Image (spheres, rainbow, N blue to C red):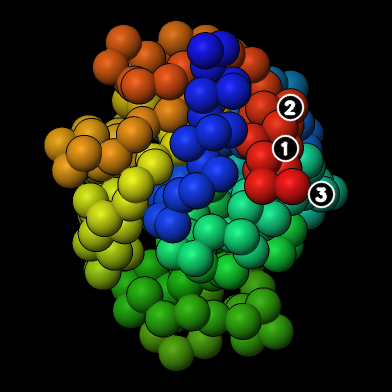
Amino acid sequence: MNPTREAVSALRNARSVAVLTGSGVSAESGVPTFRDAQTGLWENYDPMDLATPEAFARNPELVWEWYEWRRKLIGEAKPNPAHEALSELEKRVPDFTLITQNVDGLHREAGSENVLELHGNIHRTVCSKERTTIEPENFIEGTPPKCPNCGAFLRPDVVWFGETLPVGVMEAASEAARNCEIFISAGTSSVVYPAASLPYEAMESGSLVIEINPDDTPLTAVADIVLRGSAGEILPALSSSGE
Ligand code: APR
């Protein structure tokens, strides 16, 4: 059977599905994937020198400005057919969990409800010391702005390299991975842990693992079904399988 038909047929009767998405799913909305994001003004910077707590401690102004630039790109982006297809799939699968590494909020904008944001959300800002969420109208202006309660710098509520994931979110994602019949990994390079461990947890619990990516990743060799191509084309083809 061709792999797309095999995936469509598996999804047709599935009662529990978990999906892990990465920046490839937002690429067709015009949000550059993390590793392709170093263009224009930022081409000479390594993301590892911008998305770490050490980078923020060293040069908070630079890191804040990089996130301002990313927020602007994301602000102009709209959900694409991949996001919409996942929101449709949620409506017809009784137990559906969407786990995302993306911080752009586009899954919720497309109507997805049960979303676990493993790496936080770029639209939220927190105090770098107290981790409380601060609304823009309360920022003490500056680059970066400061916390109105304690005066510490504010930062985006995203997970940087070397930081731990938000409490409970990874646990909920693992549980979804271990309990699903079908696990779909879409648009992720499958190299950043702990998110990259989720398809393996699913596999060990007997789930069927489907990968959607135009390129090979470390998961490709072990996935049950590999669908080569863009998420914006493949996911709509899968999610309409119930009609
Ligand atoms: N459809 C599907 N996949 C795509 C598309 C597309 N249109 N375009 C690119 N891809 C794939 C690439 O082949 C690559 O495997 O998306 C993947 C993007 O990989 P990364 O840039 O590494 O993004 P991601 O896997 O989300 O990174 C994980 O690492 O940098 C940190 O916190 C950041 O959440 C991010 C995490």
Q: Residue at x 78, y 42 (%)?
A: 80
* Residue sitting farthest toward the left: 204
User: Is 128 on the left or on the right of 45, as rendered?
Assistant: left
- Name the amino acid type tagged 2: Glu
Question: Which residue is label 1 attached to?
Answer: 236
Residue 105 in sight in this render: no
Please state which of residues 179 and 175 is positioned toward the viewer in this rendering.
179
- Name the amino acid type tagged 1: Pro
Local packing at callout 1 (Cα closer than 10 Å; few below 14, some 14-19, many 20+) is: some
Q: Are marks 2 and 3 in contact (CB under 8 Å)?
A: no
Question: Which residue is label 3 attached to?
Answer: 78
Please state which of residues 192 and 215 is positioned toward the viewer in this rendering.
215
User: Is 180 on the left or on the right of 22, as rendered?
Assistant: left
Q: Residue at x 31, y 57 (%)?
A: 176
Question: Which residue is label 2 attached to?
Answer: 233
- Above or below residue 5? Residue 158 is below
Q: Would the CB of label 3 be found within 8 Å of ligand 1? A: no
Q: Are marks 2 and 1 in contact (CB under 8 Å)?
A: yes
Q: Are marks 3 and 1 in contact (CB under 8 Å)?
A: no
Q: Nearer the viewer, mark 3 or mark 1?
A: 1
User: Is 207 on the left or on the right of 229, as rendered?
Assistant: left
Q: Position of residue 116 (x, y in %)?
A: 44, 61
Please state which of residues 166 and 93 is positioned toward the viewer in this rendering.
93
- Above or below residue 1? Residue 118 is below
